[in-house]
Amino acid sequence: LSGEPQLLFLCNPNNPTGVSIPREDMEWVAGVCRKQGVRLAVDECFCDFLDAPESCSLIPFLEKYPNVFVLKAFTKLYAMAGLRLGYGLCADGELMERLKQVRQPWSVSSVAHAAGLAALGETGYVRASTEAIARERRWLSGELTRLGLTVYGSEANYIFFRDPAGADRSVRGRLYEALLERRILIRSCANYRGLDNTYYRVCVRLHEDNEILIRELERILAGADHLERQE
């Protein structure tokens, strides 16, 4: 190998921030990759949660950019993580044939196949879910901001935020540890390159679940403030 890059992998919207890349920018990246002979793999598994998924997806432009391979999954939007059901889209027929030759036999079980077909007909569920998530994402972002946390502009079904006063010696961060004691699990982003234990990601859940999270965070942060005043 010459050492030149052969593959660029992007996640749109990004993980853990939940921020999307506009389609125009994605097309520019795809065009540059095509000129350089680089394959562009785009994970669009969270794209369905965007208010306007078509504003960032490259799926309608696969014929124009045969170097692009889009990854999709049922595991997120349809809450079928245990079935591990996903698929890839690409206009490069030769590449697809090569993938067929090396893929695992019977990679999709009959149960997962049936569940996927059934899920495709659940248009009402998809609409209700995305609307509820968008509504709760706005509420949860506002509440986290009210508590003094730095919230980034997520457009997906999770929210990325920072505890600006929370640097400590714990591996996963003070909020992670304190919430775990209350039987609430959030994602510490301390193991992401460039981040530390003050960064977290939380999933947007049902309103009653989100209320519990905010209530416990409020108690944790109020307790921390009390300790700081005593010191």
Image (tube, rainbow, N blue to C red):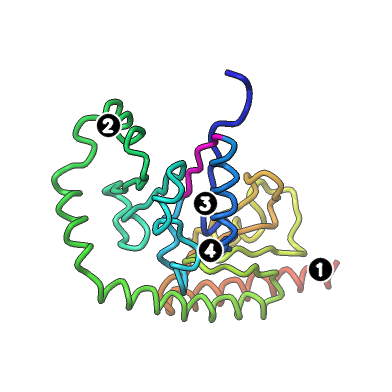
Q: Which numbered circle lies on residue 202? A: 4
Whichever of callouts 2 and 4 sits on the residue coming sooner in the sequence is 2
Tell me if label 4 and label 3 are in contact, CB under 8 Å.
no
> Which mark lies nearer to you, 4 or 3?
3
Q: CA distance from mark 2 to mark 4?
A: 37 Å
Q: State the CA–CA distance, disc 1 to disc 4.
A: 26 Å
Query: Element type at marker 4?
Result: strand
Does 133 appear above or below 10? below
Distance from disc 2 to disc 1, alpha carbons, whole Å, reads 60 Å
Quadrant of the image for the N terminus? Answer: top right
Rendering coords of residue 98 (x, y %): 32, 28
Quarter of the image that includes the C terminus:
bottom right
Give the secondary structure at mark 3: strand
> What residue is drawn where x is 29% and y is 32%?
97
What is the secondary structure assignment of the residue under circle 2? helix
Task: Give, as a three-letter code, the residue at label 4.
Answer: Val
User: Which portion, as a residue range, is magenta?
Assistant: 37-42
Is 53 on the left-hand or right-hand side of 221? left
Callouts 3 and 1 close, C-beta under 8 Å: no
Query: Is 45 left or right of 201, judged from the image as shown?
Result: left
- Numbered tag placed on residue 100 in the rendering: 2
